[in-house]
């Protein structure tokens, strides 16, 4: 008999859904069948059941946040059980120890975190039995059955566990030491707050602070353009005065003189160039590109997109969500005609069929075995849903994924880009640019937002005419724009470098960058929760607290996107058995010690002149630290942390449970927070604002989704 361990309850239930079963407490009994002649037990984790032990578990003195206890570097890392999840671990352990159980099937998510979660449970149970690995990229009945028929030997995926374990320990070392040393030193400077520092979150914050500085230091300048309308043989078009390859001048008087000179003068078409450009259909989605597109199209935060995608995956409608690849193997490409046939029967997509290409099996732009690592691109599965039964948000994300697949089977989009140089009275040169769509191709299905420009008439070099109208247009230079959350995801992927479309496509196919597909959304969420950034109208603003931390860290390697990108690359090499995790950890231990030493030295030269530190210095001491209840995620204490309520276990286990003191414009009282944590529901709160409308609702704890939701008053 076998025990199958899934990563989450709903995942376990989906995996068991293809069999006849009996439900038990904490597990499902799979009745004897062709795949499991003696039956099987399906059980599950609830995310991470174990976390790395807090510092005081190793040494009692490490509980104190003092400089003389740093750096904190354990000889050997230890795990401790999440108290709230201990019951489920007990159930799993009892199943594993049953004498009739002869094999364990590891059925965690097919990635490094899935490897870590399930293997930790097996190792901590003390049970040593043969392990097989279920490795699937979708949860359709067909994929589940095929996965159980083609189980991998656990040795094939063990390097991914080594990678995940190294990442966890390394992040713990950097996070504990850096957070403590900067919190202690900044407190000495009067900043009465906890400063969380992390390998990925801090370089990401540094990028946001850098952009904020560029905006603050920008000085807008007025400029002028001379715009003329020409009449040439009955054809009319516009152009801008073009001098020394610029259409702007910062001399108003000069612009006025050029405008006056050009009035009612003769013109001659000096040059006409036309360049035809072909645009291939976009690549299929990986998580980062989908998050960026959904943010641009629907203003969804990266975390929201991932949450919606996870629901679609659990329902079996899309492939594995945390994929970093934009390619598929031949096996997936062979299923596309069948999937598209089902999609073509949906009213919403019927007009796009028949497609230009029935198959892309031999198109290496999409089908490339070498560029598929753990998972292939995010695609719709053969289990096409009734679209009317999807929620509005699920429908939007599913629609993007479907359209991207349809677009891959369409013709290229073709444009003619035309440039006309027109000379007024033999002296003043004007330039006109425009484009004409020759073939719509894939843009019918998946329109990318851009500026189409003016449609230029068909004029020939040498033709003559007159200036119909001319005027001076005033403008002002604009500062760089703040990032949107979607742009931030792309920037993290490219390790902080701005790239053109061709470079971006190449980089997005690699694993380098800040964080991974699975962690980038949570990093942005963490920055919000730690009060380092705020999101307003889909733009990312840095707070005073965020500015202070990055100013304190300065040009240190800790804030370097390149450093953490190389770190992520080294972790990938560990997962590919190309690098040693032991050697990597030795380097990290040295780095942790260096972070402490460097911070202490730099603190002597800190000056926060020009930064608003008052909001950090003047925290309300009357309420900070007061315990308001028990954490719904880990069972720790939830305390008042100033601008939000948060779990005290963040420093120990990185527990991210928080409740903002202000939600949709309404202040959440301590009384209501206590009620929510104790009873799972607040009193009805009146006047939440969403857009132009308001509503009354109670806040409730949604146990199934493990988050706070609204219970709207009817």
Image: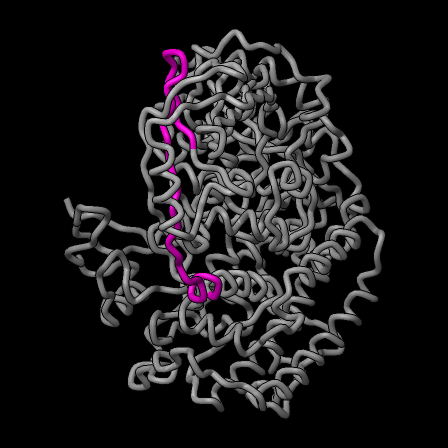
Residue 465 vs 481, above or below: the answer is above
Q: How many marks?
A: 0
Residues 24 and 365: in front is: 365
Q: Quadrant of residue 648?
A: bottom left
Q: In terms of image quadrants, where is residue 425?
A: top left
* Residue at figure coordinates x 64%, y 70% from the top left: 558
As displayed, is residue 76 above or below residue 695? below
Q: Is residue 289 magenta?
A: no
Say whether residue 67 is left or right of residue 396: right
* x and y, in percent, of residue 253 in the image: 36, 50
Place of residue 282 in the rendered image (x, y in percent of width and height, measured from the top left): 58, 28
Residue 182 visible: yes
Q: Nearer the viewer, residue 529 or 117?
A: 529
Inspect this view and state whether residue 124 appears. Answer: no
Closest to the observer, 652 or 235: 235
Q: Is residue 271 above or below residue 113?
A: above
The magenta-colored residue range is 213-239
- Residue 374 to residue 439: above or below: below
What's the residue at 28%, 69% (across, down)?
674
Question: How is the structure coloured here?
Answer: one colour
Q: Quadrant of the N terminus?
A: top right
Residue at screen point 38% across, 29% down:
390
**Residue 504 picture location, percent across and down:** 63, 41
């Amino acid at each position: 008999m076998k025990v199958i361990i899934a990563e989450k309850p709903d995942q376990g239930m989906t995996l068991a859904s293809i069999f006849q079963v009996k439900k038990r407490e904490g597990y499902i009994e799979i009745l004897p069948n062709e795949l499991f002649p003696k039956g099987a037990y399906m059980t599950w984790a609830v995310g991470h059941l174990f976390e790395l032990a807090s510092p005081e578990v190793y040494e009692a003195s490490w509980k104190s946040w003092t400089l003389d206890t740093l750096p904190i570097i354990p000889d050997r890392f230890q795990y401790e059980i999440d108290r709230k999840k201990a019951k489920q671990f007990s159930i799993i352990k009892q199943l594993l120890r049953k004498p009739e159980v002869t094999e364990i099937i590891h059925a965690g998510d097919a990635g490094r975190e899935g490897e870590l979660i399930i293997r930790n449970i097996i190792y901590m149970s003390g049970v040593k039995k043969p392990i097989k690995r279920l490795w699937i990229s979708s949860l359709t009945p067909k994929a589940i059955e095929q996965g159980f028929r083609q189980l991998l030997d656990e040795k094939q995926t063990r390097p991914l566990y080594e990678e995940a374990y190294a990442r966890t320990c390394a992040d713990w070392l950097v996070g504990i030491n850096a957070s403590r040393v900067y919190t202690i030193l900044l407190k000495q400077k009067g900043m009465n707050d906890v400063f969380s520092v992390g390998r990925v979150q801090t370089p990401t914050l540094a990028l946001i602070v850098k952009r904020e500085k560029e905006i603050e230091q920008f000085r807008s300048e007025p400029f002028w353009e001379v715009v003329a309308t020409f009449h040439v043989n009955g054809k009319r078009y516009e152009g801008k005065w073009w001098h020394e390859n610029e259409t702007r001048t910062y001399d108003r008087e000069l612009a006025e003189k050029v405008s006056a000179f050009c009035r009612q003068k003769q013109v001659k078409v000096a040059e006409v160039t036309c360049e035809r450009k072909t645009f291939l259909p976009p690549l299929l989605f990986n998580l980062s590109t989908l998050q960026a597109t959904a943010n641009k199209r629907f203003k969804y935060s990266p975390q929201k997109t991932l949450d919606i995608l996870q629901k679609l995956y659990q329902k079996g409608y899309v492939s594995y969500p945390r994929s970093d690849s934009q390619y598929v193997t031949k096996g997936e490409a062979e299923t596309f005609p069948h999937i598209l046939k089902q999609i073509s029967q949906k009213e919403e997509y019927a007009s796009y069929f028949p497609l230009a290409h029935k198959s892309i099996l031999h198109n290496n732009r999409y089908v490339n075995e070498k560029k598929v690592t753990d998972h292939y691109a995010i695609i719709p599965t053969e289990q096409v849903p009734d679209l009317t039964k999807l929620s509005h948000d699920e429908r939007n994300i599913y629609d993007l994924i479907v359209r991207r697949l349809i677009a891959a089977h369409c013709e290229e989009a073709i444009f003619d880009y035309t440039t006309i140089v027109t000379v007024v009275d033999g002296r003043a040169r004007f330039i006109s640019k425009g484009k004409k769509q020759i073939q719509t191709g894939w843009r019918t299905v998946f329109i990318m937002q851009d500026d189409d420009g003016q449609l230029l008439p068909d004029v020939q070099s040498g033709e003559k005419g007159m200036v119909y109208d001319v005027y001076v247009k005033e403008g002002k230079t604009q500062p760089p724009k703040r990032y949107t959350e979607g742009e931030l995801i792309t920037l993290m992927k490219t390790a902080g470098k701005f790239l053109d479309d061709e470079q971006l496509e190449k980089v997005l196919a690699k694993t380098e960058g800040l964080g991974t597909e699975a962690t980038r959304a949570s990093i942005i969420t963490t920055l919000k929760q730690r009060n380092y950034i705020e999101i307003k109208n889909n733009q990312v603003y840095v707070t005073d607290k965020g500015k202070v931390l990055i100013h304190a860290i300065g040009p240190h390697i800790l804030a370097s996107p390149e450093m953490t990108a190389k770190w992520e690359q080294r972790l990938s090499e560990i997962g590919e058995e190309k690098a040693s995790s032991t050697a990597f950890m030795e380097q990290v231990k040295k780095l942790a010690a260096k972070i402490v030493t460097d911070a202490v030295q730099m603190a002597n030269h800190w000056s926060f002149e020009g930064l608003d530190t008052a909001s950090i210095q003047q925290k309300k001491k009357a309420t900070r630290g007061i315990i308001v209840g028990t954490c719904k995620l880990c069972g720790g204490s939830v305390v008042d942390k100033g601008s939000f309520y948060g779990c005290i276990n963040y420093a120990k286990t990185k527990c991210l449970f928080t409740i903002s003191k202000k939600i949709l414009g309404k202040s959440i009282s301590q009384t209501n927070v206590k009620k929510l944590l104790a009873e799972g529901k607040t009193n009805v709160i009146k006047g939440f604002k969403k857009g132009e409308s308001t509503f009354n609702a109670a806040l409730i704890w949604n146990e199934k989704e493990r988050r706070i939701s609204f219970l709207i008053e009817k």
